[in-house]
Structures are given as structure tokens and as C-alpha cells.
Image: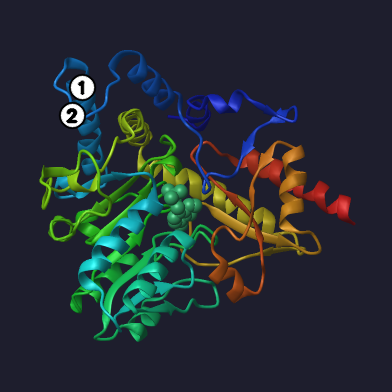
Amino acid sequence: MKINEIRNNFPIFKTKINGKKLVYLDSANSSQKPKTVIDRMTYFYENEYSNIGRSVHSLAVTATNKFEETRDMVQKFINAKHREEIIFTKGATESINLVANSFGEKFINEGDEIILTELEHHSNYVPWHYLRKKRKANIKFVKLDENLQINVDEVKKLISNKTKIIALTHLSNVTGGITPLKEIIDLAKTKNIPVLVDGTQGAPHLKLDMLALDCDFYAISCHKLYGPNGLGILYGKKKWLDQFEPYQGGGGMIDEVKKDNITYAETPTKFEAGTMQTAEVVAFGESIKLLEKIGLKKIKDHEDKVLNYGLEMLNKDNSINLVGTPKNKASVISFTLKGIHPHDIATILDDDGVAIRAGHHCCQILHDKIGIPATARASIGIYNDNEDIDILINAIGKCKKLFS
Ligand SMILES: Cc1ncc(COP(=O)(O)O)c(C=O)c1O
């Protein structure tokens, strides 16, 4: 599939922004949706809709089967050993909260240590902070190197006999840096320490293989993976999930309810309380189909070309400061412009139809470390090309002129 064919799959690109072509460089925030996903949701609501896992009528059986088919597709997509290791959540945030709660409840006690990094999104810090307060545990932060990259040696330094879990990002939503996960997981394995990976930014750009990676938990955000909003996935090794108490209670997740006792359904149902995002899960199957049709290797190669072109163009301008220069990176470029606030950059770029994000990107620890309160961030998805970068550079030029 050629790049302009990929873009044709996304109806949003017919929309003009301020009369201009839409240059969407905000996929790290949320990706646009292919027509097949949108159509699948409509088809489901028009022809197949019912709640799942409850009624025995035909629609309910169809809806339940379609829902469970996506679980099978996800299992294959990420190469998990068991389909029960796939839990649907409302986002990567909920996936991480689930682990922090259920793992924390069972395995974290006073004085225990949790290892995070200075690169983490608030979604992979705040849930652990709650746990720290609740259980009187401690959080240690892996120091980043001068390129704002996570190094194995720094992780090693923090591991002690009190370390109960390591939770870290696969790909930074600020620097685009790719974490040397395999080395870190192999190291953790030698000490029997489980590893949770925040794969929110990794999943849209990197081929996933849970069996090869051997992490214990992997959090995915479907709305950044060309899927519907309000949907996420938690991959968790069955050996852990089976031991966990459910994270939320309600309908659909129980086995038997008595006045004085409740038993729970098996994994993964015990973690899917209440009415689930039925149409969203079914339609997410179409995102997987599209990604597989294009090919993950082809996606990565294409995005890398656009990324490298973007870095080359931005590097030519001395007034642009690139934030984080990890050697192994993908998709994300954060920068500042001398004398112009990132919010002003984003607002002015919008006049030219260029959508970027400005702010601390939910990474205040990182921004405190580098002493910059906010950055401008351009992030690349499968529909971007070098022309988008040219328009970005041109719009940055206009922005500079306006402030000179
Ligand atoms: C690295 C990272 N982790 C977690 C999240 C939260 O993901 P979700 O919106 O699916 O809860 C984000 C969203 O921006 C992110 O970039």
C-alpha cells in the first residue's frame, strides 16, 4: 500500500483547517481513525448491537462472539501465549491503574520499592504514587542520560532486594526514545522482578511480540493505534492475573454472589466489570487488519524516513532546540523555539492547518529535570509524509517572523 493510499483510508484528511490542508502531527496524542474502523462501528450499531456476555438472544450471541474475536486478534497481533491474557480497559491509564491496584494489593508492603524512570507519563507515575501512599512503599526513579535516554546500567543501580516491580515506558511520548527493554527485562528476570511496560507509544510504531519480550504486563492505548476512543488493552501474564483480586467490582465479572460472599469469574472476565465498550472493541479489529495489511515493518520504515527528514530540517535552524536526542528513536520530535512559548507556536501553526501539541505532555518530572516547563511536539503517524514536514517547517518560519 502506497502512502497516499494509506492517507485515503482516513476521512478526516478531507477536512480543511482554516482553509488549509490538514497536516496532522499529533498522533502521539491520539491518532486519526480509518474509514474501516468508523464503518465497522456504524455497521455494528446498525446490524449487530447488543450488550455482551449476558443475554442468550441471537444479537447478544453475535455481539459477544464479535467482541471475543477481537480478543483473539489482539492475542495474535501482540503474540501473547493465551487469549485470557488480553484484558479490555478504557485506556492505557486504566491498564496501569489495574496493575498498580491488583499487584499492589497483593505484593507491595511497607518499605517495598517500585522502580520507575524520569521519562514516565503521569499515567505511569500517579497510580504508583497512590500505591506508595497506601502501602508506605518507596518509588525510585531511573536517571536519564544526557540524551534523555534510559540506560540499563542506571536501572541496575536501583535494583535492591526490596524491589517489587519495574514500570517503564517502551517509547517516550516526549523524546521518541526507545527503551532497551529486552536488556532491562532480562536483567529483572535474573532477580525475579516483574516488569510493566507502558506501551502506549510503542505499540503504534514497533512490532510487538510478548513471548519474545517476556515482560509481565504491557499497556496499550487503542485510540493511539488507529482504533476507537475510550479503549485500551492490558496484556498480563496469566500467572499474575490469576493471582490478582479484581480491580473493579460490578456486573459481568462475578461467578456467584451471596449476601456474605462473592466469587469471581475467571481471567480476563473478572477484570471487565460492567458494560464494556462493545462497538469499540469490535471495530478495533479493523485497526489491526489495516496495520497488518500495510505491514508493521513498512510502517516503521516509512515513519523513520519522515522522522529523519523532520530532524534534518529542524536541525538546520539554530533557533530550534530539539529536546532529547536519543540514538534509538521513533516518531516523536519535541522542540522549543528561542523566545516563543510552545503554546504560541502551536496556535500559530494551526493557522496553516498544522496540528501539533504544546505543553508538558503529562511528563512534569522530565520537564522539571530539563528545566523547561513546556515544549512543542510534532508526532508522526502512518499518514504523514515529507510534504507535511515541509509545511511544518514553513509554518515555523512564519511563526518566527511574527515574533521577530
Ligand atoms: C506514554 C503514555 N502513557 C500513557 C498514556 C495514557 O494513555 P491513555 O490515553 O490510553 O490512557 C499516554 C497518553 O498520552 C502516553 O503518551
Q: Position of residue 324 (x, y in %)?
A: 57, 67
Q: Can you name the residue that lies furthest to the front here?
A: 259
Going by the image, does 144 lie left or right of 348?
A: left
The amino acid beneath tag 2 is Arg
Q: Can you name the residue that lies furthest to the top here?
A: 47
Which quarter of the figure is the N terminus placed in?
top left
Which quarter of the figure is the C terminus placed in?
bottom right
Looking at the rendered image, the disc whose residue lies closer to the viewer, 1 or 2, is 2
Going by the image, does 127 lie left or right of 364?
A: left
* Neighbour tally class for label 2: few under 14, some 14-19, many 20 plus, Cα within 10 Å: few
Residue at image position (63%, 25%) is: 15
Going by the image, does 97 lie left or right of 316?
A: left
Query: Marks 1 and 2: CB-CB under 8 Å?
Result: yes
The amino acid beneath tag 1 is Ala
Residue at image position (64%, 40%) is: 388
Q: Can you name the residue that lies furthest to the right here?
A: 404
* Neighbour tally class for label 1: few under 14, some 14-19, many 20 plus, Cα within 10 Å: some
In the image, 69 versus 137, the foreground residue is 137
In the image, 52 versus 35, the foreground residue is 52
Q: Is mark 1 within 8 Å of ligand 1?
A: no
Q: Which residue is mark 1?
A: 60
Q: How many marks?
A: 2
Q: Which residue is mark 2?
A: 54
Could you tell me how far apart the alpha carbons at marks 1 and 2 are, in whole angstroms?
Answer: 7 Å
